[in-house]
Amino acid sequence: MIHNLITSRAVPEIVAERGGTPIRSRVGHSYIKATMAETDAIFGGEHSGHFYFRDFWRADSGMLAALHALAALSETDRPISELMAELDPYPLSGEINSTVADTVAVTDAVAAAYDAQDGVTLDRLDGLTVSHADWTFNVRPSNTEPLLRLNAEGRDRAIMERVRDDVLALIRKEG
């Protein structure tokens, strides 16, 4: 199962718990589709609500996703809100855009601020993803505007808000 790098960390955890193989991809349908073709993945999904199915020519289909969701709902008496709570355990910031003059310099400044911290890993698959056991965030440039896009996640709301605010302060100071 392919997921883009700014989906919740719950996605690869749940896929692995249920016997699947999660594979991270850059953001964007062309990257998802290419990775699906390379790996023969049965499904690909993006944080933006785009869903791709191998058996549907790797096409994006909200209708097919809705039919799968309805089929799953028909097998239980539990409300969808209860089912979704199990699949969405980590608070997310949502995408926050900041206008900056030099996206590369600001991204590098964010990387430098977090690089030496204990328990932190950095990767540059698409922008900069910084991960810790209790939180993660991604900062990536827009392809069409002078923006950096921040998505943050935490084990709880307070952690997410602290990380979100710390990273935004850094971006806006440097930008």
Image: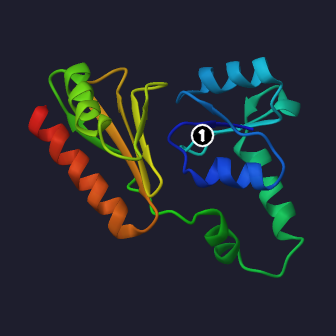
Rendered location of residue 169, percent (x, y)? 16, 47
Query: Which of the image's four quarters has the N terminus?
Result: top right
Query: Which residue appears at 36% of the width and 60% of the height?
Result: 160
Instruction: Tell me which amino acid carries mark 1.
Output: Glu
Rendered location of residue 100, percent (x, y)? 17, 29
Q: Is residue 133 left or right of residue 65?
A: left
Query: Which residue appears at 61% of the width and 55% of the height?
Result: 10
Q: Is residue 96 left or right of residue 29?
A: left
Q: Quadrant of residue 97?
A: top left
Judge the density around disc 1: few (<14), some (14-19), many (≥20) Cα neighbours within 10 Å: many
Q: Quadrant of residue 171?
A: top left
Query: Which of the image's four quarters has the C terminus?
Result: top left
| Residue placed under numbered mark 1 in the picture | 46
Q: Quadrant of residue 104?
A: top left
Which of 127 and 62 lies nearest the eye of the viewer?
127
Which of 8 and 109 lies nearest the eye of the viewer?
109
Rendered location of residue 11, percent (x, y)? 64, 50
Rendered location of residue 149, percent (x, y)? 33, 37
The answer to whether residue 48 is above or below residue 32 is below
| Count of all numbered marks drawn on residues in the image | 1
Q: How is the image coloured?
A: rainbow
